[in-house]
Amino acid sequence: MGSTRAVTKAVIPAAGLGTRFLPATKSQPKEMLPIVDKPAIQYVIEEAVRAGLTDILVVTGRGKRAIEDHFDRNFELEYYLEQQAKHDLLKEVQQTSEMADIHYIRQRDPLGLGHAVSVAREHVGDEPFAVLLGDDIMVDDSQLLRSMIDTHARYGRSALALKRVPQAEISAYGCVEPEPVHDGLVQVRSIVEKPAPEVAPSDLAVIGRYVFTPEIFDALDRITPGAGGELQLTDAIGLLLDTQTVYGCVFEDGRYDIGQKVDFLRANIELALDRDDLGGDVAEVLRRIVRERGLLDG
Ligand code: G1P
């Protein structure tokens, strides 16, 4: 058994340049792109808060000030909404600045995900913590993070989120060699970042949710540039495996990879369909598009 301290801290790397969404991300952080009417990063922070993590460290970089402003008070806007008696909007605006204890640190150079997590060391200290990647959005009722925290509480070890993906897609992910423990839980035997499909050890991809023991920081200190010339978190997990068991929580549904344009659009459509105030109208628009463009097969 290792550390069984409760997990209370979450680290959210948000320093990436967002090149896949240019020109939208030329002068605004990709984390601020809206899914329906809420910035993507707010979904991630709400997920952390739902799982009981209220101390949040966002690792930012240059050009990311809008993230800090979004989670700060905006007195002028609050005053205006109050004057206009727009009480629901006022409440919503105030809630975004009160939902968690949010801290920021800058990653000065974009050296990779492993480096981004390593700059959280001082804030996290000698405690277990979660890492949530902003490109992965989980639907509201996803219990994934909670079950990963429970796995850590039970075994005192790190836990990764895993999902089966088609073989051709595995080279976009970290990939593990698994050893089954019980339904939905595996032990990680080995891990490799972005393997070619023909050498991938399985079809289990690492999805952007992690719960780590603090020993990951020592491993992060020892990694050298890996896939894509970047300091890879996956390589640090590989080093951690030399001294500690690492678990994988396998899940199936409820994730959008908003780093991919098609999935970004799917997230917008499906989350709008789920909304009481929009669902009916959006469904009607979709029906009309399908009809007018003859999109139904057969
Ligand atoms: C990162 C990680 C990778 C993981 C993926 C999940 O890759 O390096 O191991 O599978 O996130 O989304 P990226 O998407 O930043 O290339």
Image: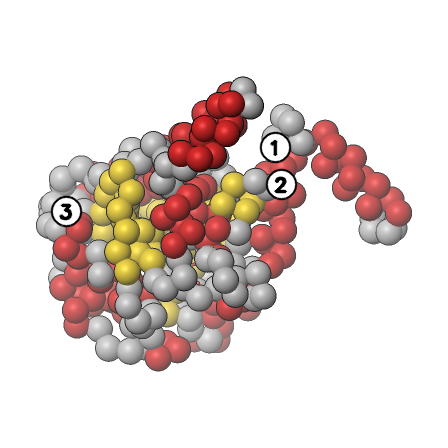
Name the residue type under label 3: Glu
Res 250 visible = no
Q: Describe the element under mark 3 as helix, strand or loop.
A: loop
Contact between labelled residues 3 and 1, with CB atoms less than 8 Å apart:
no
Give amino acid for label 2.
Answer: Glu
Whether pointer 2 and pointer 1 mark residues with C-beta atoms closer than 8 Å, the reply is yes
Q: Is residue 139 above or below residue 221?
A: above
Marks 2 and 1, how far apart at CA: 6 Å
Relative to 238, does residue 12 appear above or below in the rendering?
Answer: above
Q: Which residue is mark 2?
A: 270
Rendered view: 110 above or below 273: below
What residue is disc 1 on? 274
Callout 1, which amino acid?
A: Asp
Q: Secondary structure at mark 1?
A: loop
Q: Mark on residue 127?
A: 3
| Numbered tag placed on residue 48 in the rendering | none
**Which quarter of the picture shows residue 55?**
top left
Residue 289 in percent (x, y) is at 82, 46
Mark 3 / mark 2, whichever is N-terminal: 3
At 41% from the left edge and 61% from the top edge, which residue is drawn? 63
**Residue 118 drawn at (x, y percent):** 22, 62
At x 31% / y 36%, what residue is drawn? 100
Q: Quadrant of residue 21?
A: bottom right
